[in-house]
Image: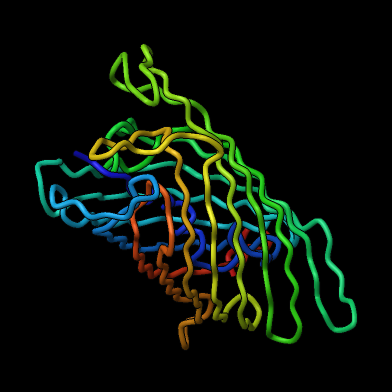
Amino acid sequence: MRIITALTMFNMCFSLSAQTESDALFMAKKNLCGGFVYGNTTWDHYWEGTFYRDNANIGTFKSNSVMAMTNYGISNSLNLIASAAWVDNRVTAGTLIGQKGIQDLNLFLKKELWAKEIKGFNGSLVAVGGVSTPLSNYVADYLPLSIGMRSKTASLRLLGDVQKGHWYGTASAMYTRRNNVTIDRNAYYTTEMVYSNEVFIPDMFSYNLRLGWRDGAEKYFELLADRMNTLGGFDMRKNDMPFLSNDMESLRVGVNLKYPVPRVSGMSVMLTGMHTLTGRNMGKAKTLMAGVVYQVEFKNGAKK
């Protein structure tokens, strides 16, 4: 017996650091920032549809991940962002075998569309387009232990940011188009019997809100909340296995900070904590993340 995992690893990792696809900060032209993020997610209760329960057959779900990410400034208002993660999922009880491996490649182009100062308030509007594709032939039809959904995606995010002094607020909305996937069986049951190895994956819509204090892109502290829901799908049946096309919803809150490493120019550390408040066909997850990034500038072919 299996239950649904928090399939938001990508969003969680990218809520961690500055100059990412979900904030209004940009890497300067010919600057490159790269780093690694370690993440740990656990839960022992979940929502089976809207019913909140535990499951002694699996005990506690535990996920550990390491994400490599980089951001390059094509110009001061256009950034290219890339990331890929290695994920290890396990449960503490029962007979389910843990899964681990390289997940997906994520690519984003981030463009500032408008920026202006009005009566002491600095406002900006940003658009972000992204795609993702699996990097390995991992098993998707094995929730909650599968490391991803193996669906190729395309997304568009619109983001608004307002700052006065060091205080700021950022709000964004993102639509994600997800391709169907094939699984290693020729029939499955959703709300009816389907005789095919192709599974419909519903598209996804998400919102993100950040409120905090920042000093440039190198130092900040923020409170954040995000809401995610699939545009379709069905609920898990009582005591049954979850499935890729389940209706998945979640509301999470957390804190996020970044601080430069003293006496090491260009290096910063980041910390994030997230907690799931409500969900549907999701685990009530707690997530802790820590990472380090380093920034360099390229001029005339040389590194500065």
Residue found farthest to the right: 119
Task: Using the rendered view, name the quadrant where residue 246 is placed.
Answer: top left
Say above or below: 63 vs 190: below
Which one is nearer the viewer's eye here, 204 or 126? 204
Say above or below: 245 vs 170: above
Say above or below: 73 vs 120: above
Which one is nearer the viewer's eye here, 160 or 138? 160
Which one is nearer the viewer's eye here, 148 or 198? 198
Relative placement, left or right, of 255 versus 297 is left
Q: Position of residue 59 (x, y in %)?
A: 16, 55
| Residue occupying image coordinates x 33% and y 30% | 137
Q: Position of residue 96 (x, y in %)?
A: 14, 41
| Residue occupying image coordinates x 33% and y 33% | 140
| Residue occupying image coordinates x 49% and y 61% | 34
Q: Quadrant of the N terminus?
A: top left
Relative placement, left or right, of 113 versus 74 is right
| Residue occupying image coordinates x 61% and y 66% | 209
Which one is nearer the viewer's eye here, 181 or 204? 204
